[in-house]
Amino acid sequence: MKDIINKLSSHNTLSKNEAKKVLLNISKGKYNNSQISSFLTIFMMRNITLEELQGFKEALLELCVKIDLSDYNAIDLCGTGGDNKDTFNISTLSAFVTAGAKVNVSKHGNYGVSSSCGSSNVLEFLGIKFSNNKDFLKKSIEKSGICILHAPLFHPAMKNVAPIRKELGLKTFFNILGPLVNPSFPENQIVGVFNLELARLYSYLFQKTNKNYAIIHSLDGYDEISLTGNVKIITRNEENIFSPQDFSLQKLNPKFINGGKTIKESAKIFMNILQNKGSNSQNQVVFANSGLAISTALNISIKEGIEKAKESLKTNKAFEAFNKLKNLSE
């Protein structure tokens, strides 16, 4: 690791093979915490390169516990996090709304590191069971339309990194990697990123796959469709900038989509929205993000997807999907 850190400190970058080897060695416990922390910190001071990202991705997918959900044509909705916006759990709520619209979801998520409450924090608090058992996950998606892939159960080789990330409390390149390493290899994916440079990298990687995808970056910094301003959306065939009005939705004040300060507060917001008791602003953001997911999976327009999302939430289909998943957890 000493040679790698010296190389990076001299403003050099890693080849794909070098990046892959470092992550494989981290998984084998070959480096101490100080070395790993130094390595992570370097990437907090500059943008990751495409080759480095490819190498890290290959290592994690090689090491992960793979789960075959190819029969379900599922979609994953997640963001990189790290946008420092502290919104409520938009992508997780949107996942249940998407499932309620009869689009299968394989939701990859984790505990919050750079935010107070990640998707796993709130779902665990609300009684959702995490498992990497193939039969349980298939049953979940068959009964409720959604299964939860809690990252630590599928990436056990990264146990050496988790406590260091938690102590740092800042976004690292693992935030960037998260959406790229869903162990079920979903056919469809919505991913939010915290800057345009990262959107370009993701676009390049996804172009080399067979995924249906949409990469989201709100131009005021959110890693989701925030409706607080314009958003860039990149798909396989095009990239466009949309205003909230383009979705027939209103522009929002950022304060109206803030999340809770604690896991308990975040869970309360989550359940209020899921039970169709959220504010108009909260609902609109969920409609936008789940509408995009539905449109991507079903190959329909975003406006049509938004209408299906509204129906899912307002007719309690999203809440039913959550309850079915929770009942399976008991």
Image (cartoon, rainbow, N blue to C red):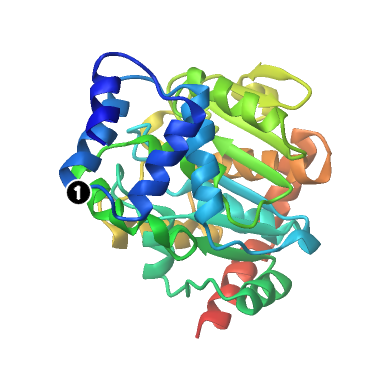
Instruction: Find the residue positioned furthest to the top.
Output: 11
252 lies above or below 330? above
Residue at 77% x, 39% y: name it. 210
Residue at 57% x, 76% y: name it. 133
Q: Please indicate, yes or no, whether residue 81 appears anywhere in the rendered image.
A: no
Residue 315 sits in which quadrant?
A: bottom right
Residue at the disc numbered 1: 32
Q: Percent position (x, y) of residue 50?
A: 52, 23
Q: Is residue 108 left or right of residue 210?
A: left
Q: Percent position (x, y) of residue 45?
A: 27, 21
How many numbered markers are drawn? 1
Residue at 26% x, 36% y: name it. 1
User: What amino acid is labelled 1 in the image?
Assistant: Asn
Element under disc 1: loop
Q: Is residue 174 left or right of residue 33?
A: right
Q: Please indicate, yes or no, whether residue 208 appears anywhere in the rendered image.
A: yes
312 lies above or below 256? below
Q: Is residue 154 left or right of residue 312?
A: left
